[in-house]
Amino acid sequence: MLLLVTLAALLLLQGALFPPDSSSGEAPVIPSPPRQQIWYHTGYPGGVAGQPGGMSALTGPTWNVSIHGAYMGGPPAAANNHVVQVYHSALGDGTARDAHYLAAIVETVPGLIERQRPDLILYQAGMDPHDGAGISPEALALRDADVFALARSRGIPVAWVLAGGYADLDTLVRLHTGTVEMANQVLALVRPGDRIEHGGTDPYVWSADGGRIRFPAWHALIGKPRLSLPPALTDAEARERAAARDRLLRDQRLPAPETRAAYEVLLSGATHP
């Protein structure tokens, strides 16, 4: 099953693409033809998968995973669109809410990856949970480390993009820097074949040594996370949503001259008249 995916402005920074084993210094190789890809994003449910004009078509070899706050609604579950809504308000602010969010990710993502066995993971490291749900910068960094370690230990390449966040600039820089730092730490410390364990008692500390990757036991702190899985669309509803997406793309597409002029202004540093 051939996978054809186009990503506009895919951000590949140092440590952003994890080949199955980059220790040899050889260029990363993605298997071809790939079986399946997982596009996994956290935070605001609009954008990529939530809008009819988003990247996920609800059908095909791309498996989309969206984890976001239940209060935000979000995209429907259908075909290859796996939606997990987290009830952040079930726990108070602070460590309990952080642990609840991280436990929700641990309960959802590893099993899905085991079932789907993707050749590539595209991870949107959304920062909306910070200002939207009160998740701390430390917890978001641990979330990123967990996702990166999960992919790295299984030998699955992962590419990630920075996304989201409506806080002040200094806070956003801190949040996104945390993702970069975790990507580089995992790349340096984790090897394919390493075993992930959840048994640490400090909710914000992880380690990797001797083939063992140890993350906190977030479930032990809060019990079973409060989640909901929205009912899936029927095949007919999924087709209609895909058609609505196509109509939206067609109706909102700027004429080529306008698009070219907008980019020329942007790249030249000029301003509109």
Image (cartoon, helix red, strand yellow):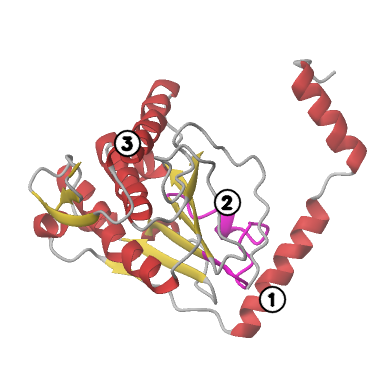
Q: Earlier in the sequence, mark 3 or mark 1?
A: 3
Q: Residues within 10 Å of mark 3 (few under 14, many from 20)?
A: few
In the rendered image, which residue does mark 3 sit on? 188
Which label is found at residue 47?
2
Classify residue 49 by image quadrant. Answer: bottom right
Asked if the residue at tag 2 contacts the one at tag 3, i.e. Cβ–Cβ closer than 8 Å, the answer is no
> Spatial distance from mark 2 to mark 1, Cα to Cα?
19 Å
Task: Tell me the magenta residue range.
Answer: 43-63
Q: For numbered disc 1, what is the local secondary structure?
A: helix
Location of residue 61 in the rendering, given as x and y in whole percent from the top left corner: 59, 70
On the question of residue 134 being in view, the answer is no
Q: Position of residue 164 (x, y in %)?
A: 48, 40
Q: Nearer the viewer, mark 3 or mark 1?
A: 3
- Please report whichever mark, 2 or 1, sits nearer to the chain's N-terminal start: 2
Q: Is residue 60 magenta?
A: yes
Check disc 2: other Cα within 10 Å, few if <14, some if 14-19, many if 20+: some
Residue 48 figure quarter: bottom right
